[in-house]
Image: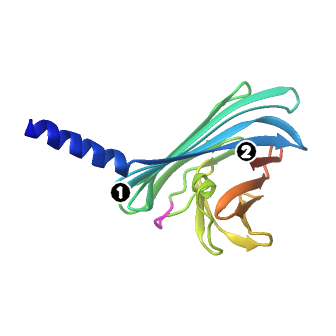
Amino acid sequence: MLSLLLFAFTFQIGNAQNLTNERDYEVSVLGFKIGEMTANRSKSGDSTVYKVKSAVSFWFFGKVNVDFNVDTRLLNNQIVWSRSFSTSNKGDFRSELKWNGQFYTVDAATYKFENKKPINDPLYLSGSMLFFHEPKGGENSLAEVYGLVSKVKKIENNGYEVTINGNTNKYYYKNGVMVLAEMESPIKNYVIKLVE
């Protein structure tokens, strides 16, 4: 009986420490909805996992359907692992980043871009985390898909700007929540908007 009570108590504490948040977004091009995106954050003890997934369909020299996923794991607030993958009727791409105790190994491949250059410094912010964290100007942010790091720049209207591989993305916040993002892409620029 005592074992059962201890198990129940431990289980309740474990559940209390597991915190999950989820936000839904609409993806659009020139005001027309092309798909949906979901951002998820789950925390258990010292570990936090961020997941972003989307499904979009648009016209780019023919109809393109893309399913995209990124998972980023933090331990004691430091990014220790990230993986992104996209599948489409025009090709599949995958990127992975791992902290080995001294630096990050990078194996990134996306549309017309590949990168295997390691990252030497610990990282504490990434693109998937921006859905849940309003950044500060001057912070380093990881672009999981490219395996590249860029400085966050503060702009007007509670906005922040991050330039990755020549593409400038802008994120806007209201009461600490990311409500709008204007994304540049080598394929097609798009907008991500919070569904309220």
Residue visible at 63% across and 75% down? 138
Which residue corresponds to mark 2?
Answer: 195
Image quarter where the N terminus lies is top left
- Characterize the magenta stretch by its predominant secondary structure: loop
Callout 2: few (<14), some (14-19), or many (20+) C-alpha neighbours within 10 Å? few
Residue 24 is situated, as x and y percent measured from the top left of the image, at 66, 42
Please say if 14 is above or below 174: above
Residue visible at 75% across and 54% down? 181
Residue 78 is situated, as x and y percent measured from the top left of the image, at 44, 61
Q: Is residue 72 left or right of residue 91?
A: left
Q: Which stretch appears magenta?
A: 119-123
Tell me the distance, in whole angstroms, between the alpha carbons under discs 2 and 1. 30 Å
Looking at the image, is mark 2 or mark 1 earlier in the sequence?
1
Residue 31 is situated, as x and y percent measured from the top left of the image, at 89, 43
Q: Is residue 29 left or right of residue 127?
A: right
Which residue corresponds to mark 1?
Answer: 46
Residue situated furthest right in the rendering: 30
Residue situated furthest bottom in the rendering: 138
Q: Is residue 12 left or right of residue 192?
A: left
Q: Relative to the observer, which residue lies in front, 36 or 175?
A: 175
Helix, strand or loop at mark 2: loop
Amino acid, disc 1: Asp
Helix, strand or loop at mark 1: loop
Amino acid, disc 2: Val
Q: Quadrant of residue 25?
A: top right
